[in-house]
Structures are given as structure tokens and as C-alpha cells.
Amino acid sequence: MGYLAALTLDRGRTAGLLATAGVAAGLSVHAGIAAAGLGALIARAPLTYELLRWIGVAYILFLAWEGCKPDHNDDPELTCSSSSSLFWRGFFSNVFNPKSMMFFISIVPGFVRRDSGDPNPFIQFAQFGTIYVGIATSVHASIVMLAGQLRPWLAAGPRKNALRRILSLALVIVAVWLAWTTRRV
């Protein structure tokens, strides 16, 4: 969410919405993995879990580093390649988010009921995943829209680079928090 707000403040509402679409696609991957039962395998494979966890932490640190660089391009026009890049950044920031994966591995299965009249847990996982992705995307899009409204005031003139540094520091804090809270004890 912080990445989406920072991106929107820096590059505008369209950029934030493109990344939101990527985040939604990443959440959909997690839902599909959980529905197929692969999430439980990842949870039981410590090396795979650790690899994904550290890739996620490294990617957030990369986004923070990238955000610290001063922006010398004030052209807000998005090209096709930058649009694609924004989508993929949103996608990877979520696919490598171990918190999201663990949500689908540990929380969602508790809602799947064999006695619900639908004997196929895959269908129930798909329904829960669709609902979750829809709600999360609505929240993310709302954050982008609010950041878009605040952008002229927050990201104008000399405040822009200071805001970039503050938001990059926030991403570093998120990366440290993610590394700490997703470790296996």
C-alpha cells in the first residue's frame, strides 16, 4: 500500500492504478497457488519459503533504493513500456510478498467447508480468492485515488524529493518489518 501511495505521489494516478492492477494479478497468483494446494507445499519446504521471503525483502529494498534517486524527468506521460513496467512492479511486489502467501496458506483454508454442499474445495478457494482480490483491489485503488488527490499539494516543488526520501525510508522499514515478522522461529 505504501508503494502504491509513493508511486502515485511521484508519477500520478494512472501509474498507481497500473501498479494496482499488477498487485491484483499477484494476489490472484497466490489465490491460485493456494487453491491448487501448492501453498501448503511451499509452507512445508523451508528452503523455498526462505528463498521467496528474501526475494520479497530484496525487491522492496530495490524499490526503496529506486525511490531515493532524484527524479529528473518531470514528463508525466506514460509510455507503453513504462506502463508495462509499472504493472510488473506491482505484480512482483505482491508475488514475492510472503505475508500475502501465508494469508492464503494459513487463513483461507479455515473457511473452506466440506459440508457446504460443494464437495470441491478448489471452487471454494476460487470464490474466497476472488472476493479477497476484489476487496484488496478496492482498498488499493482507494489509496491510489486519495494519493492522486493529495499529489498537487504533497509532491510539488522542493517537497517532491524530500517526500521521495521519506517514502523510500518507509519502504526500508517495511522491508525490515517483513524480514522480521515472516521469519520462522
Image (cartoon, rainbow, N blue to C red):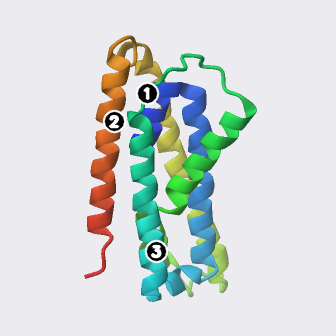
Q: Which residue is drawn at 44% across and 26% down?
A: 9
User: With 110 as the anchor, is 89 left or right in this view?
Assistant: right
Badge 2 density bin: few <14, some 14–19, many ≥20, Cα 10 Å: many
Q: Position of residue 181 (x, y in %)?
A: 28, 67
Give the quadrant of residue 147: top left
Helix, strand or loop at disc 1?
helix
Q: Mark 1 points at which residue?
A: 147
- What's under tag 1, amino acid-wise? Ala
Q: Which residue is drawn at 62% across and 38% down?
A: 18
User: With 55 as the anchor, is 18 left or right in this view?
Assistant: right
**The residue positioned farthest toward the top in the image shown:** 157
Mark 2–mark 3 CB contact (< 8 Å): no
- What's under tag 3, amino acid-wise? Leu
Q: Name the residue under label 3.
A: 51
- Nearest the viewer among 115 and 26 is 26
Q: Residue at x 53, y 24 (%)?
A: 12
Looking at the image, is mark 3 or mark 1 earlier in the sequence?
A: 3
- What's under tag 2, amino acid-wise? Leu
Q: Kindly report the distance in space between the C-alpha atoms of the residues bearing marks 2 and 1.
A: 13 Å
Looking at the image, is mark 2 or mark 1 earlier in the sequence?
A: 1
Q: Position of residue 20 (x, y in %)?
A: 56, 43
Helix, strand or loop at disc 2?
helix
Badge 3 density bin: few <14, some 14–19, many ≥20, Cα 10 Å: few
Q: Kindly report the distance in space between the C-alpha atoms of the residues bearing marks 3 and 1.
A: 33 Å
Looking at the image, is mark 2 or mark 3 earlier in the sequence?
A: 3
- Nearest the viewer among 72 and 149 is 72
Say which mark, if any, is on residue 167: 2
- 17 w.r.t. 22: above or below: above
Helix, strand or loop at disc 3?
helix
Q: Say how many tags the image has.
A: 3
